[in-house]
Image (cartoon, coloured by chain):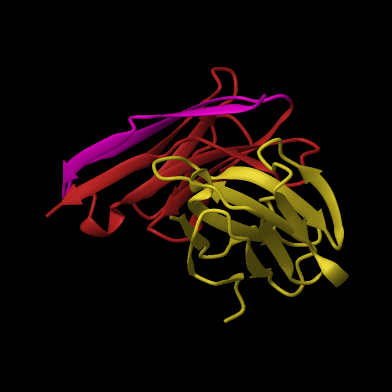
Amino acid sequence: EDKVVQSPLSLVVHEGDTVTLNCSYEVTNFRSLLWYKQEKKAPTFLFMLTSSGIEKKSGRLSSILDKKELFSILNITATQTGDSAVYLCAVEALGSYGKLTFGQGTILTVHP
Amino acid sequence: DTGVSQDPRHKITKRGQNVTFRCDPISEHNRLYWYRQTLGQGPEFLTYFQNEAQLEKSRLLSDRFSAERPKGSFSTLEIQRTEQGDSAMYLCASSSPRGGPNYGYTFGSGTRLTVV
């Protein structure tokens, strides 16, 4: 059974801090790893990673995948209060037709 | 709004009652997924459809749960004889004809069910 574990489960920082969120996974026939941001409603897509060592970047957010060690990290630099949310990591297996297995999420709280 | 729509947004029901939720996917998406999310957890896969065919069901989907997608457009998720443990957010997602998160996988805002 596919499994995704995220750490830490919660994190409290101040504006301007840099945070690193971790995601480790076990999946048969890995296809992709995805990061989502969830603010009380629908998860919104951040990144999809399929290859090791290639950093994806969007503004202050970046993510990288290590397929050998089976983990990914999500970095957020110069955090802002608007970054406060639950960050979800999910994996997709080949042949699963888009079915995602999610971790439990990391709750990030950014104080002014 | 051309995103994934879910109705109702909130539902409070008494234990033992039946409830039905609706999901309207993005019109050109042929794949539709249902997930359940409880407090403090990530979404858990329940079932998915390709067009009108239900291709996979999770073990989480007990006999009290049934999902349909008539005509391959909107979908409904029905829970019969609700239990307090059914209280959760029910999320719907749809994806484009090529399928999977690579291609426009979009979540709706969810239906929050509270069973009292």
Residue shown at 74%/44% (left/top)?
Answer: B63
- Report the front residue among B91 and B79: B79
Does residue B99 show up? no
For residue B67, side relative to residue A36 (left or right): right
Whether residue B112 is situated above or below residue A29 in the rendered picture = below
Out of A8 and A79, give the one closest to the viewer: A8
On screen, B101 above or below B74?
A: above
Does residue A39 appear left or right of residue A94 in this picture? left
Magenta range: A1-28
On the image, which quarter does residue A104 sit in? top left
Q: Is residue A26 magenta?
A: yes
**Nearest the eye: B68 or A12:** B68
Q: Residue at x 49, y 58 (%)?
A: A44
Would residue B15 be counted in the magenta stretch? no
Q: Is residue A63 above or below residue B16?
A: above
Query: Which image quarter holds the N terminus of chain A?
Result: top right
The color chain A is rendered in: red
Q: Is residue B58 left or right of residue A83?
A: right
* Quarter residue A29 falls in: top right
Q: Position of residue B77 (x, y in %)?
A: 68, 60
Q: Position of residue A38 (x, y in %)?
A: 42, 54
What residue is shown at x 75% (from left), y 51% (from top)? B48
Q: Which chain is yellow?
A: B
Report if residue A29 is visible in the image.
yes
Helix, strand or loop for the magenta stretch, by majority: strand
Residue at the bottom extreme of this rendering: B1
- Across and down, in percent, residue A23 comes to 46, 30
Q: Residue at x 69, y 72 (%)?
A: B26
Quadrant of the image containing the C terminus of chain A: bottom left
Number of numbered callouts drawn: 0
Name the residue at the front extreme: B16
